[in-house]
Structures are given as structure tokens and as C-alpha cells.
Image (spheres, rainbow, N blue to C red):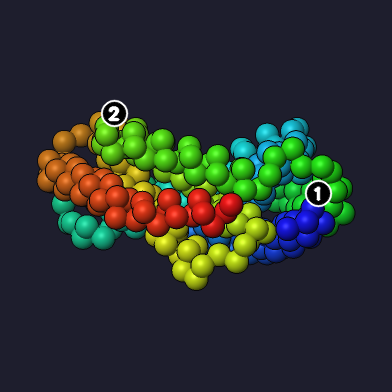
């Protein structure tokens, strides 16, 4: 594909991601539900993937360094809301009725309520700074007309190779830290592939779906790790006291954590061959 064609394809990809972000931001300001904040978190992550890809391909990102500080601070709040909501949802699905379980749920509900109030103010600040303007066609084409410092295929191959190293490490060690490192790098590869692979070739049907399914399994394992750590922190805090059902709750969460961890590793092994085949697609 020619330089001009790559630039045009990337410009189009940037445009819909920018519009999705603006729509999600407006919806969250109007109605800061967990659904809207989750969409906003996804849309912001996609913009940051674009910015990171531009940095590596062209040596220049779209968001100025001074503005990136505010963006990352805002993203931290968004991620906290998303994590808190998913944690609550998974815990409620356990359908326990013990004193300890209900007390933990109460603490998390209060935390989520505080975060949702904070997010509206943060959204308004981000809207005032108009981050989306940095992803305008004029701004993006200014960079896209530059000579690339790294080929698109090389960027994807590099990310895939890094995923491969961490995959082997995760299977060998089998611990939470190794699986988490793999999850973070795999997420970077998946979103970069989603952005850049269509610039090179027409991706086989179903590719993006199975890439997402792998990320879902890795995310599930990480969620139960976070749940275990968070519940331990809540139960151990001053004034919480000893409540009926504490031991049962700890054991059940630990079992869910181990099961999701094992399932994620097994799913990875099952699908790894398909991931390796992507190397030929992105030549």
C-alpha cells in the first residue's frame, strides 16, 4: 500500500474514533451511568492507541505532552469506575446473604457513588480542554504526510513478538504477575491490530472477534485477582470487625480467582496457534 493510501486509511480510522469519543463524553456528562462511563473509557483508550501508534510510526503523537497529563489523570478515574462496577457485578452474581458479604457490597456501592459524582466534573474539564481537536483531519494529516520512521507491519510484528515472549513466561510461571503482564501487552497488540491491520490487508472474517475473546478471558482472571485483593483490604480495614460469613466469602473468591486463572491459560494455549498465524497476515 502506498504512503498516501496508508495516510488516508489512518485518517479515516482516527475520524470515527474521535467522533465516538465525543459522543461518549457528551452522554456521560448528561447521564454518568456505568454503561456510559464504560463506553467513554473504551473510546478514550482507542484514542490513546492511535496516539501511541502515531508516535511509533511517525515519531510524533497527536496529543501534546502537557495535555497528556490531564488525559491520563481523567483515564485513571474512568478506570476506577469501570473496575468498581465490574467488581460489584461479579460479587453480586455470587448471590450470598451473609453479613460480611452484604457489608462488602455496601462499601463498594458507596465508593462507586462517589466516583460517579466525580466523573461529571472530570468530563466537563476534559470537554473544556477539547482533546478531540487534536484528532482533527487537519492535525492528523499534518503528521501523516511525514515520512514514516517505522513500517506498519514492523510495528505489529514487534508487538506480536513481545506478546509471544510474555505468553511463554505466563505458561512457565503460571502466576498472577506473569498473566497480568501478558494481559497488558496483549491488549496493546489487540487494539493496535484493530487500528492498523485493515490499513495493510483485509483481515479474515472473525479475526477481531477471537482476539477480543482472548482479551476477555485474560481480563476475567485479572478481575478476580482485583476482587480478592479489594475484598481483603475492605475486610481488614479498621472498624470493619468480624462478621458472619467472612471465611466462606474469602474461600469462594479464591476459588473463582484460581478457576479463572486456569481457564485463561488453557484458552490461550488453545487459541495461540491462530494468534501466531497473524504474523503471515501482517507481512
Q: Nearer the viewer, residue 42 or 182?
A: 182
**Is 124 located above or below residue 95 in the figure?**
above
Report which quarter residue 251 is drawn in: top left
Report which quarter residue 55 is drawn in: top right
**Is 32 located above or below residue 183 in the figure?**
below
x 75%, y 48%: residue: 131
Q: Nearer the viewer, residue 175 or 71?
A: 175
Q: Is residue 216 left or right of residue 4?
A: left
x 85%, y 48%: residue: 145
Badge 1, how many Cα within 10 Å: few under 14, some, many 20+? many
Quadrant into which the N terminus falls: bottom right
The answer to whether residue 81 shows anywhere in this view is no
Badge 2, how many Cα within 10 Å: few under 14, some, many 20+? few
Q: Secondary structure at mark 2?
A: loop
Q: Is residue 24 left or right of residue 145?
A: left
Find disc 1 in the rendering and name its residue: 144
Q: Nearer the viewer, residue 259 or 110?
A: 259
Residue 201, horizontal then vertical, whole percent: 62, 62
Disc nearer the start of the sequence (2/1): 1
Q: Is residue 186 left or right of residue 244?
A: right
Report which quarter residue 281 is drawn in: bottom right
Residue 173, horizontal then vertical, whole percent: 27, 32
x 79%, y 53%: residue: 3
Residue 238, numbered label: 2
Residue 120, horizontal then vertical, whole percent: 62, 52
Q: Residue furthest bottom?
A: 205
Q: Secondary structure at mark 1?
A: helix
x 45%, y 59%: residue: 212
Amino acid at each position: 500500500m502506498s504512503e498516501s493510501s496508508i495516510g488516508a486509511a489512518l485518517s479515516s480510522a482516527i475520524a470515527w474514533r474521535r467522533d465516538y469519543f465525543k459522543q461518549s463524553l457528551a452522554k456521560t456528562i448528561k447521564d454518568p451511568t456505568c454503561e456510559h462511563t464504560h463506553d467513554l473509557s473504551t473510546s478514550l483508550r482507542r484514542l490513546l492507541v492511535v496516539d501511541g501508534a502515531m508516535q511509533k510510526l511517525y515519531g510524533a503523537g497527536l496529543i501534546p505532552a502537557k495535555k497528556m497529563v490531564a488525559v491520563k489523570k481523567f483515564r485513571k478515574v474512568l478506570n476506577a469506575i469501570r473496575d468498581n462496577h465490574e467488581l460489584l457485578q461479579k460479587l453480586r452474581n455470587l448471590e450470598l446473604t451473609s453479613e460480611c458479604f452484604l457489608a462488602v457490597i455496601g462499601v463498594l456501592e458507596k465508593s462507586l457513588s462517589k466516583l460517579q459524582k466525580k466523573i461529571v466534573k472530570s468530563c466537563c474539564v476534559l470537554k473544556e480542554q477539547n482533546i478531540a481537536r487534536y484528532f482533527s483531519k487537519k492535525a492528523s494529516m499534518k503528521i501523516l504526510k511525514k515520512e514514516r520512521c517505522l513500517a506498519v507491519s514492523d510495528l505489529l510484528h514487534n508487538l506480536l513478538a513481545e506478546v509471544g515472549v510474555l505468553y511463554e513466561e505466563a505458561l512457565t510461571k503460571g502466576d498472577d504477575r506473569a498473566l497480568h503482564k501478558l494481559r497488558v501487552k496483549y491488549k496493546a497488540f489487540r487494539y493496535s491490530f484493530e487500528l492498523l491491520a485493515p490499513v495493510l490487508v483485509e483481515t479474515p472474517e472473525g479475526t477481531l472477534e477471537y482476539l477480543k475473546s482472548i482479551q476477555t478471558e485474560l481480563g476475567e482472571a485479572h478481575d478476580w485477582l482485583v476482587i480478592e485483593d479489594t475484598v481483603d483490604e475492605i475486610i481488614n480495614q479498621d472498624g470493619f470487625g468480624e462478621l458472619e460469613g467472612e471465611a466462606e466469602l474469602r474461600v469462594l473468591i479464591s476459588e473463582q480467582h484460581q478457576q479463572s486463572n486456569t481457564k485463561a491459560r488453557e484458552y490461550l494455549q488453545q487459541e495461540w496457534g491462530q494468534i501466531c498465524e497473524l504474523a503471515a497476515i501482517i507481512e
